[in-house]
Amino acid sequence: MEQLSTELPNRVTHLQVDDRDVFLVGTAHISKESVEDVKTTVRAVKPDTVCIELCQGRYDSLTKKDAWKKMNIFKILKEKKAMLLMAQLILSTFYRKLGEKLEVTPGAEMLEGATQAKEVNAELVMADRRIDITLKRVWGYLGFWSKMKLITAVMLGGFTEEIDEELIDEMKQKDQLENVLGEFAEKFPEIKRRLIDERDIYLAQKIRQAPGKTIVAVVGAGHTPGIAEHIQQDEPLDELETTPEPSTWPKILKWSIPLAIIGFVIYSFFKNGASHSVENIYIWILVNGILSALGAALALAHPLTVVSAFIAAPITSLNPAIAAGWFAGIVQAWIKTPTVQDFENLPEATGTFKGWWTNPVLKVLVVTALANFGSAIGTWVAIPWIISRSV
């Protein structure tokens, strides 16, 4: 390769991959210096291709500021993407706060990579895995109780963390997604595997597959060692692009619960009489209904929404294909249909605990989550109760 006319920043790693030159620009994601590093490197190298650590969806969210206006909350609920949207909103909120603190736009270094690619007439490659696949893999490989712990931790701590200088200095050494769920990675090794390690491999292979003899890749500094380790080998990505299928046992368990409840109600009818069987039915209805309704009430849902959660929970708990929160969310969205203004206010609303309970869009998501959570608890309370009084 010809001698560069400009000395590259010290956070740039030069790799020789076969007969090609790859320059990894390790960025801090929240640093003005990183933006300058990207600009300096691309202008000095004049690459054939610039790879950036974004998927198309995340790139669009950064560049299309009116994307919120086009969101359809009913479609999100029907496609069961409420939890995914909540995770994405928490992610964007955390980095917006950091951006305000440091006076730099979150993702600015990635956008600078795209801008510089256009300036030098280089091809632009979105090198990261789709965020929805990453989050689904993180979620899908967690056990039930790990999921409950994770939800609790997010709800209790997601809006209260102070962004001080010590936190900022720490974050400069890490990857963007890793920062948001970094503390969970220590408690849940499976999260780190899906969130960080898999994406090291994915990014490395996308950069390896990029066209041209000279490539600049803008990636989080935390990914640089992993990419350097995996980029020399040609590794398949098919498995990393799939979302986990539920194993056989959870499927069996989901259907065995309603069958067991129905079976015990019938059993109690023949053993203890009709009145005892009716009491078991009342227990199932009241425990499921009350706890799901309580979840909706905690979300400050409309009274009709609370009633819908109460009615839906005992029925949906017997059908694994549907959920009480889905019905409650639909009713809440129907009663208080979010406006374009509500969607436009999402970035500000997600930044406060109060905003999640007052913004109509966010309230629908909270109602959905808490009604589902209440229904799940109700199922696990009602089952042993019914069994203990029937045997």
Image (cartoon, helix red, strand yellow):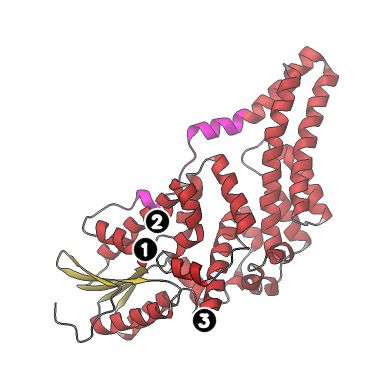
Q: Main secondary structure of the magenta part?
A: helix
Task: Name the secondary structure under disc 1.
Answer: helix
Q: 53 or 61: nearer the eye?
A: 53
Q: Residue at x 59, y 63 (%)?
A: 161
Badge 1 density bin: few <14, some 14–19, many ≥20, Cα 10 Å: many
Q: Are marks 1 and 2 in contact (CB under 8 Å)?
A: yes
Task: Name the secondary structure under disc 3.
Answer: loop
Q: Amino acid under label 3? A: Glu
Discs 1/2, front: 1
Q: Which residue is mark 3?
A: 103
Q: Which residue is mark 2?
A: 196
Residue 100 lies in the magenta-colored region: no
From where the camera sits, is residue 127 visible? no
Compared to residue 201, the image places residue 285 above or below, namely above
- From the image, which quarter does the N terminus lie in? bottom left
Compared to residue 206, the image places residue 28 above or below, namely below
Q: Which residue is mark 1?
A: 222
Please report whichever mark, 1 or 3, sits nearer to the chain's N-terminal start. Answer: 3
Q: CA distance from mark 1 to mark 2?
A: 9 Å
